[in-house]
Each structure stands twice: as C-alpha cells, then as structure tokens.
Image: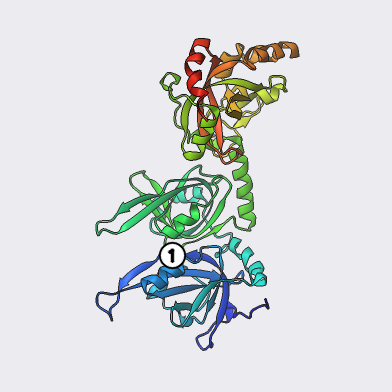
Amino acid sequence: MAAQTFIAISELHPNLSHPKVAGIVIGKSDVKSFPDRKNIGVDRFTFGFTIKDSPEFFVNVTAWGNDLYVNGLSNSFSTGDCVIVENPLVSSKDPEKGDKFCPTTPSFYRLMVTEVHSQVSLCADTGAIERLLPLIHLPVKDPGDFYSLGDIVANGQRLEGTVINILAAVRSIGEMKQFITSDQRKGQRLEVKLFDDSVSSFPLVCWDREAIQLVQTLIPKETVLFIADAKIGFDSFRSGMTATVNAKTIITLNPDTREASLLFSYAKEVAESGALDQDEKPEDVPVESITDVYTVGQLKQKAQDISEMFFGITYSFVSKLDLNSSVSKLIKTRCTRCNFMVTEEEVSCSNLMCPGRDQMFSSATGFDMLMDFTDHTGTLQACSLRSPLAEKALGCTTEEFTNLTDDERTAMKWKLLLERCKIYVKILPSIKMKSGMRAVVLDCSVADPGEVKQHMSVLLQQP
C-alpha cells in the first residue's frame, strides 16, 4: 500500500479542504448524551479523544451524532491505537465553552467529526504507525514539571482543588465499584494506589469508564505513570490528600524520560525486596481455623479463578528442600519494621519507604528458604518457608543450623523429604511468579497416617 499524505497537527487551520490527520490516541473520554434543543425528546451523543502526531503537537477531537454512530465509533478504538481522522471540521478553540473540559493542547484548533461529513478509522499505514507508536510514551507536559507524592503530602490542603502533574509508580489496582446516582444514572469508581521513593501509598481515583479500562491493563509495581493535570483534593474520611483523574487528565504509561527511568528502577528494586507487600498483607488466620482441604491442582486452579488471598490444607509430599545451599541463601536478616532485606552489619534500613527510618533501627535474623510439595495432581514450587515455622519444622535454631556439617544437613533434609505432610498454606496472587501465585507455608508436619487415609479417598477422586 502506498504511503498516505497526512496534514500535520501543527499545520491545521480552518481553511483546509478535506484534511486528513493521522495520530496516536493519547486520551479518550466516556460517551455522554444531552437533550437535542432542536428536536424535543431526542438526545445527542458525544465523546472526545486526543491524538498526537509529533513530540510537541496534539489536538482534541470531538464526535457528535446519534446513539448508534457515537457509541459505535467510541467502541472502534482505544487509547494507544493509531487512527486516521478524515475531513473533520477545524475550528478555533473556545476556552469558555467545551474546551475547558478537555485536555490542554498546544494547537490553536479543535476538530469535530460527524457521521455525515467525517470518518475515523484505525490506521493501516505501517510507516505512519511506526512513527506514531513511540509518541505514546512522551508526556504531554514538561517531564521535569511534576510533584512527587511527598510534595503533595507535605503541602497538604494548600493544594486542595489544584490541578497538577504527578510522576509515580503503580502499587496496586482496586476493584471497580458500580453504583446508581440519585438521578438513576449508572456510575463507577476505581482506586489505584501509587507510590514513589517518598511515599509508600497514595490514592488515585478514577470515575470515567475509559480511564478505568486503561488503568485495569497496568501491571502493578512494574508501571510508572506521568499523570498530567490530575486534580488534588482532601479526603476528610481518610484525613489525607487524593488525586483524581478528570476530563483534562492525560496519563502517559512508562514515560520515556530520565526521571521515569530512575523511578522504574527504584520500583523494581523495592518490589523485589518484598517491602511493599508487608503492610498490604492481612493478618494470617490461626491455623486451627483453616479447614478447607485441597489437592495441589485445586490450589492452582483456585488461584487462577480468584484474585484474592486464601488459606488451605494440603496432604502432600515435600519434594524439594535444599538445605545444602550456602547459609546466606537460607538465613537472612530483615528490618523488623518493613521486612526489607539488610546485612547484619547495617545500622539503618536502606529502604527509603521504611516507616521506621526516623526511629532506632532493629533487625531480625531467621530462616528464609523455599520448598516444593507434590501430590498426584502436580507440584507447587518455590513455597516460602520462614522463621519461626522453619525452626519448628527443622527442629533447630538458625545458630544451631550454621554449625551443622553437610552430612548433618542432609540427614535433616531427609527427615522431611518424601514424607507425606500436612501443610497449611496461604496462597497469594503474584505477577512475579510464572504460575501467577505465591504460596507461604504456615505450618508443616508429618501427617498422621490415619488422617491421611481419611482424606485420601476424597483426594484421589479430585482432578
């Protein structure tokens, strides 16, 4: 296919005849309806989107028409798609009218498309697509013009009602909550928790369905956002500041900037340390209250079916427990306040988000190892076994363990290895594990033969 000729956004003006613009969609709003003043009882539908065709230039596009046309057009593309807008009406921006509810753009104009005169389609020009795709990672504002989450918290209610830029990483994504408004309209709300090197958790609230669909695709702890024109408010319920995505907001995923790259590296380091998980974990329930029995296959299936933590019992064989590794791989020292891994020689926690950085440093040394367990339905690999449970399972302290010979460690390993054990586990979703789940052993002991026999007839019938 021959390369097409497009008008650059920077060259748009009202006198152009049948302009054709190609751009990547960097923002999109929900479809809304209004009573048509010319036709009583009829609604007009509209939505807006923003396209970019160069690092410096982007423009707002508004579609108007009936329900079928506007909703059909909105469903035909998403943020991140490359589109071609043919024969739009090019008009000057009016800050006093609709343009104050759209993202701020460097263009003097805005585009309007209708079913009769215009066409919007996905771009099939490979040359144009290759040129446009990298633009999705360029912020629409100066990449150095942003507030850190610490700046927002420090300024507090002085920022109430302001619109600012934020650079932060995604910590977690909540569930979308749906509701009915007082005038019987459907609404939705989703909250994203952000973090950076100054604040461990900060709420970003999304009300728009398009914004919610965008953030639901993000990978927590592996995504950095540049949020242009987020509205800052004070939430009296939680007595803290929040950011809200609004009609003017444009979110850039994993920005191609030095500042974002540094934050991404920090986020990856903190996520791998496990420090972010500590204050998110609900308290473990007493093992006595755990009664649900699973095969390994059932544990894996349930972890795929639900995205929440759950507890269970499995009667399985310990199939891997490497006690002959170096001591540094089996015994680790962690900060007692944030669980960040440290060395025994350190006198302060190196985690910048540790809640105890201004307090006297304390650490604890304990077993921190991995084990596999297996039954007739499969193997659950890399299950976490930590102190104090590890001391109970192994029958020795960390100090006693370090003084054992290799032969003594091997003998200790075979006391558990290939034994049918009763294992209490906590299963958590995890994006870092290939299986999508992470297992933490809460209790492990050699199973009573009578108890195993009681459950075996049921377990053998399970897939």
**Is 315 on the left-hand or right-hand side of 248?**
right
Residue ID at (50%, 86%): 14
Where residue 147 appears, x then y in whole percent? 51, 54
Query: Which residue occupies the foreground of this view, 112 or 235?
Result: 112
In the rendered image, which quarter is residue 246 located in? Answer: bottom left
Horizontal arrangement in the rendering, residue 80 relative to residue 261 (left or right): left
Residue 22 place in picture, x, y as percent: 58, 74
- Quadrant containing the N terminus is bottom right
- Residue depicted at x 63% and y 41%: 269
In this view, which residue lies farthest toward the right? Answer: 406
Amino acid carrying label 1: it is Ser
Q: Can residue 342 be seen from the camera position used here?
A: yes
Tell me what residue is drawn at x 42 percent, y 58 percent: 209
The residue beneath circle 1 is 29
Which residue is more in the foreground, 376 or 188?
376
345 or 184: nearer the viewer = 184
Q: Would you say residue 356 is visible in this rendering?
A: no
The total of numbered circles placed on residues is 1
Location of residue 357 (image quadrant): top right
Indicate the secondary structure of the residue bearing disc 1: loop
Q: Position of residue 5 (x, y in %)?
A: 63, 81
Instruction: Classify 297 as above or below 118.
Output: above
Q: How is the image coloured?
A: rainbow
| Neighbour tally class for label 1: few under 14, some 14-19, many 20 plus, Cα within 10 Å | many
Image x and y of residue 52, in percent: 56, 70
